[in-house]
Amino acid sequence: MLFLLALACSTPAPVATEVAAAPEKVEPHEAHEGHEAALKVALGKAPDEALAVSIDDVIAKAAEFEGKVVVVKAQVAAVCQKKGCWHRLGTANPDVTVMVKDKEYEVFLPLDATGKSAIVSGIFHTETLGVDEAKHYAEDAGKDPATVTGPVTQFAIDVDGVKLM
């Protein structure tokens, strides 16, 4: 009996001679039924799409929304090209954008998010940037900071969540 046990332990295990097939390569593709959710990206706390209103509606009633939590839908107009730590939302007026920043420095957008639709939630407010801070943001956006010649007043959202569509 001990002989059989010793023989069984000293016999090499069979070696597989069949090679597994390489996995099929999956190409990037457009959204289709069953895959829509996989193509959306949520950053931070996922905003509730059902509550989203147009950014233009919020701007039209800026005083009413000042200091309040908003959930808005808009197109990303610009993204910080260093880290994606801030972005701007476009509005119906091409000269007006809304700065979106995270005070906790936790919500970062992909650097190529410009032009994508987004649902953004956070606290809406109006802020005035000093010249140095405004120049810093211009530089981060890849623009000439020399174009900033004075303080800049802008609409802003202190973001807690973004969903890219």
Image (cartoon, rainbow, N blue to C red):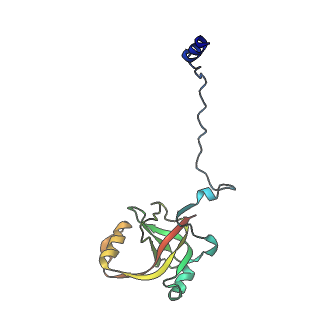
Residue depicted at x 60% and y 70%: 48
Compared across the picture, whether 34 is left or right of 58 comes to right
Image spot of residue 13 (x, y percent): 57, 20
Above or below residue 20? Residue 159 is below
Image spot of residue 49 (x, y percent): 62, 70
Q: State the residue in front, 29 or 101.
A: 101
Image spot of residue 58 (x, y percent): 54, 82
Image spot of residue 147 (x, y percent): 32, 75
Point out the residue furthest to the bottom here.
63
Q: State the residue in front, 48 or 59.
A: 48
Compared across the picture, whether 163 is left or right of 34 comes to left
Classify the position of the N terminus by image quarter. top right
The number of numbered discs placed on residues in the rendered structure image is: 0
Point out the residue furthest to the right here.
33
Point out the residue furthest to the front here.
1
Residue depicted at x 52% and y 77%: 91
Above or below residue 7? Residue 146 is below
Classify the position of the C terminus by image quarter. bottom right
Q: State the residue in front, 9 or 17.
A: 9
Residue depicted at x 40% and y 62%: 81
The picture quadrant where one finds residue 55 is bottom right
